[in-house]
Image (cartoon, grey):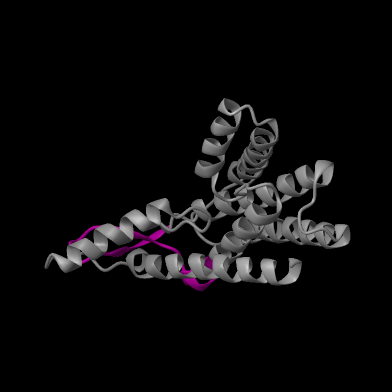
Amino acid sequence: MTTTSSRHGATEPHTPAAPYWRLLVLTAVAAATDAVSYLGLGHVFPANMTGNTVLLATGLTAGSADDAAHSAAALGGFVVGAGLAGASAGAKRWDRVTTTWLMADAALLIAAATWWAVLGKAQPHGAAQFGLIGLVSTAMGVQSAAVSHLDVGVSTTYITGTWTSVSVWATQMVGGRRPVSTAKNRVQPAVLVCYFGAALVAGLVYHATTT
């Protein structure tokens, strides 16, 4: 892995021909998947395991077996996908392994979308619902692990850390400090905008096509 030097002499991980536009595409896919799944698959987040962990806990405490089961299915699918993709992670660059796993990610999402379309229901129930949750959550686990091994400091599936980094960076700017300008700092605001925009569009499309 090669590195680039920052203004203070530190080194920053660098992916050859850093594919940040691809990361934005993946971000949009994850946001749209989360939005549509939350609306149509029993309020689960295939890409956001923090939310699912809380929903699992609150479902158990409230005695809501359905809510707990949905969250457990999402967590299980994500863990399986991330574990499989993470186990084969190689060099910290966009290589054949990364491409292969992201193709698997796309295949799982296409399979889920096709299945959902064949069902013809805005909100599937029963085994079909759990099957769809498992597929999309496994896809998001694969994507998350594939991107994390690139070591570019940007996540496409969960953005709490991104919000934190952008907030700190913006506060430093407002306070008169000049934070180090890195590729990661430059792309993170775009990730936030992309995530929000994709979720917004996905929500609008879902409501427009199911009402």
59 or 82: nearer the viewer: 59
Q: Is residue 180 magenta?
A: no
Q: Position of residue 125 (x, y in %)?
A: 80, 46
Q: Residue 136, relative to residue 23: is it above or below?
A: above
Residue at x 60% of width, y 54% of height = 143
Residue at x 63% of width, y 27% of height = 63
Q: Is residue 149 visible?
A: no
Q: Which residues are magenta?
A: 1-23
Q: Give the position of the C terminus as an image quadrant.
A: bottom right
Dividing the picture into quadrants, the one containing residue 87 is: top right
In this rendering, would 80 be left or right of 182? right
Residue at x 68% of width, y 66% of height = 206
In the image, farthest residue toward the right: 118
Residue at x 65% of width, y 31% of height = 64
Q: Residue 19, relative to residue 82: is it above or below?
A: below
Q: Position of residue 128 (x, y in %)?
A: 82, 46
Q: Position of residue 59 (x, y in %)?
A: 60, 32
In the image, farthest residue toward the front: 211
Q: Is residue 20 magenta?
A: yes
114 or 93: nearer the viewer: 114
